[in-house]
Amino acid sequence: MANSGGRLLTTTLIVGGCVLLGIVAMILVYREPIKAEKKDPMARNLWVAPDTSQIPKGPEGQLIRYGRDLIARTSYYLGPNGTVAKSTNGMNCQNCHLDAGTRPFGNNYGSVASLYPKFRARSGGLESIEKRVNDCLMRSLHGEPIDSLSPEMRGMIAYFMWLGKDVPKGQPAAGSGLKPMAWLDRAADPTKGKRLYLQKCQVCHGNDGMGLKISEKGPYIYPPLWGDHSFTTAAGLYRISNFARYTLTNMPFGATHEKPVLTEEQSWDIAAFVLSQPRPDKRFKQDWPNILLKPVDHPFGPFADNFSETQHKYGPFGEMVSGKK
């Protein structure tokens, strides 16, 4: 009887333990999370660049890899001490097109293969990839155009085409360009922006905005945001909306489009401060042949309205935007 009682007690404990484990498991499976993380709906189904391990071997692959290296290390080839030409200001293409042009909402190249050639209002005509590349070299890198048949141009184009090989023709890659952002309801403030810059940005770009180099003649670790070696007034980032959107989703270091560090308002003010600083003044008189298509934050006249250059540069933009509708 004692043995029988022991077996009964053992069986009871085993059954009870199983029931308890089952209840715990059900709780773990079916309980709702305490804090559900909010997902950015725009983060779904974003374009992802093909892995570089998929670059083919042989001459085609060599050209693609050369093109990628030109984007990542432009200064090595075309900078002040370039091995191919001494032309540009020392910045790299990927200073504006992050991670060699592959980061979501980091001004990536995902749509180049699918959308070019395309009409661009700035030139008023159909633009080839070659034209777009040379525009960047002249406007952002303050350099000279390169020959369309040069190994450098062919390499960059090979890289762009490989990056976008899976994007349907005529369709943009999700997450290409810059993330949409609402217009600020006041003028962006350079004074507020300066305070924010010193808090959030100077650790990498310097309190003088001159960036950080590996060595005196070496490449930039962090690019200059103003001064003789920064992008010119003809660059796309000289438009405050572009700079603010770029900053919001990518700066300071560690920020992403899903987890920004700055608010939208802070991004506008930092953009206002940075763009108020001196930089190479470069203008192309042939730009915006149809001034009705000129963006409201393009800061140089002539304009199709009566607002000042200052308001076109810093805002507020609400009345100008509504007037273009």
Image (cartoon, helix red, strand yellow):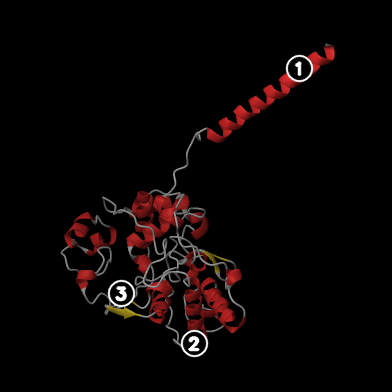
Which amino acid type corresponds to the residue marked 3 in the rendered image?
Answer: Arg
Q: Residue at x 26, y 66 (%)?
A: 295
Say which label, 2 or 1, has the lower sequence index. 1
- In the picture, the disc for residue 120 is 3
Badge nearest the viewer, 2 or 1: 1
Image quadrant occupied by the N terminus: top right
Label 1 packing within 10 angstroms: few (<14), some (14-19), many (20+): few
Secondary structure of the residue carrying tag 1 is helix
User: Which residue is labeled 2 in the image?
Assistant: 150
Q: Residue at x 54, y 71 (%)?
A: 72
Say which label, 1 or 3, has the lower sequence index. 1
- In the picture, the disc for residue 8 is 1
Which amino acid type corresponds to the residue marked 1 in the rendered image?
Answer: Leu
From this viewpoint, is residue 106 visible? Answer: yes
Q: Position of residue 13 (x, y in %)?
A: 72, 20
Label 3 packing within 10 angstroms: few (<14), some (14-19), many (20+): few
Cα distance in 3D space between marks 1 and 3:
84 Å
Image quadrant occupied by the C terminus: bottom left
Q: Position of residue 321 (x, y in %)?
A: 22, 59
Q: Position of residue 232 (x, y in %)?
A: 38, 71
Secondary structure of the residue carrying tag 2 is loop
Q: Residue at x 44, y 47 (%)?
A: 39
Cα distance in 3D space between marks 2 and 3:
24 Å
153 lies above or below 44: below
Residue closest to the eye, 269 or 111: 111
290 lies above or below 313: below
Which amino acid type corresponds to the residue marked 2 in the rendered image?
Answer: Ser
Place residue 60 in its image quadrant: bottom right
Residue closest to the eye, 32 or 267: 32
